[in-house]
Amino acid sequence: MTLDAGSSVSAWFALGGALGGVLITGVIALVTAILNHRWQASATDRTLDWEHARQIRQERRETYAGYWAAWNALMHGLLQPEVEVRAEEIAWRQALDAMFLICGQEVLDAGIKHIGLTEARLEARTAHIDGRGLSRALNRAMREDILARPRL
């Protein structure tokens, strides 16, 4: 059996077509795999960012609640002049330190003003010094800090 030139060319074209098809299919599969990997990595990053933001919000909620509990105990102690408030002051300062470690900029700014008010009350040994809305401003900043998505 002999192959003529036309059959030989057709066989080469068939082989080239088959190899080209395999090559194109391989490239498409490779590009698809790369894109899927990128999409999965991106989805994983978004999930990790969301989880991290959720955890920060929860930690801020707990820290801010602890701050107000300590501050309120200190203010109640100051309403009773015969009571020593050293333990309450220490608890408030510890809660303040924790708050400043985790808070956003707005809470930090409002918290610094709130410290001034609290220290003035401690120095005067009374809770009756007008704070001109400093506690409300700090509380509002805390609420916004908890509800906002933290910058990561």
Image (spheres, rainbow, N blue to C red):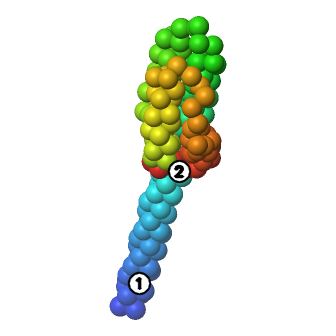
Labelled pair 2, 1 in contact (Cβ < 8 Å): no
**Where residue 77 sits: x, y (%)?**
60, 15
138 sits left or right of 97 in the view? right
Mark 2 surroundings within 10 Å by alpha-carbon count, few (fewer than 14), some (14 through 19), many (20 or more): few
Residue 150 appears in the picture as rendered = yes
Q: Amino acid at mark 1?
A: Phe
Figure check: 57 above or below 90? below
**Where residue 127 sits: x, y (%)?**
59, 25
Q: Amino acid at mark 2?
A: Arg
Q: What residue appears at the point 47 percent right and 16 percent down from the top-left corner? A: 90
Per the image, the residue denoted by label 2 is 46
Figure check: 79 above or below 42? above
Q: What residue appears at the point 53 percent right and 50 percent down from the top-left corner? A: 46
Q: Nearer the viewer, residue 101 or 107?
A: 107
Q: Which mark is residue 13?
A: 1
Q: What residue appears at the point 49 percent right and 17 percent down from the top-left corner? A: 89
Q: Secondary structure at mark 2?
A: helix
